[in-house]
Amino acid sequence: MNPGAGDAFRKHADSFRINPPILRLHSIISLFKKDLLLELRQQYAFYGVMLYVASTVFVLYLAIEQPEAEIWNALFWVMQLFVCINAVAKSFLQESGGRMLYFHTIASPAEFVVAKLLYNLLLMALMNVLTLGLFMAFMGDPTYDLPTFVGISFLGAMGLSLVFTMLAAIASKAMQQASLMAILGFPVILPQLLLLMRLSKTAFAETFTDGISLQVVLLLALDLSVAILSVILFPFLWKD
């Protein structure tokens, strides 16, 4: 057999090999710190989201004041959905083409997307605290089990941030990124949003509802699958 032909065959086979995701903790921490420092220096975007949350809750208060428990629950999750879209969309919009080329030289795509996921988790946790506090301050607290609802709200904020981080990455490759992210996100997030509304209803009831643990496990499984798929699929966007 011709040795040159063997080398050519091996090179051809290597071109179709999928490299496993590479995760280095120091690179993830550095990228996470970069996003955090950028947010602290450009505080207008964060304060803009906070103003959006406060003004929307105040308008809801003027319209319906003290709503019933079911309406309160539905309004809270719809509010969380729009807050997530506004907060997470900018995570990839602020990355210019030159900056992305620089990131190609210092980090792997898996490290980059994991840092984005972690940063958006922190951002949505803060937005969840703000939204929940304003809802209770203006429209009362109709829950019977507040700790349960708080835990479910953080779980929901985590799921929303994971889904829309990946959608923001996809939309960043096209024009009108924020609009495209909202269009792509509606059919994807709708089942999770319905599950969150159904699960959070247990905090408004005096009696214990069966199947709560199964729904929580299902929600955690959805969040974990989104995170894994983001790490696996983002390298294909990274090459574009």
Image (spheres, rainbow, N blue to C red):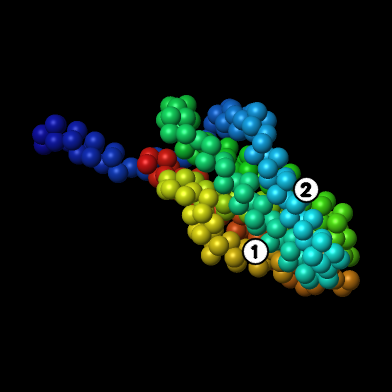
Tag count: 2
Q: Which residue is mark 2?
A: 130
- Which sits in the foreground, 29 or 190? 190
- On the image, numbered disc 1 is attached to which residue? 193
Q: Quadrant of the N terminus?
A: top left
Q: Secondary structure at mark 2?
A: helix
Query: Residue at coordinates 62% horizontally, 63% vertically from top-left?
Result: 192
Disc 1 from disc 2: Cα separation = 19 Å
Q: Of residues 73 and 201, which is closer to you in this image?
A: 73
Q: Is residue 224 visible?
A: no
Tell us which disc is closer to us: 1 or 2.
2
Q: Is residue 228 left or right of residue 82?
A: left
Quick check: can you spot residue 94?
yes
Disc 1 packing (10 Å; few <14; some 14–19; many ≥20): many
Say which of 114 and 168 sits in front: 168
Answer with the quarter of the image where residue 8 lies. Answer: top left
Q: Given the image, on which type of amino acid does mark 2 rest? A: Leu
Amino acid carrying label 1: it is Leu
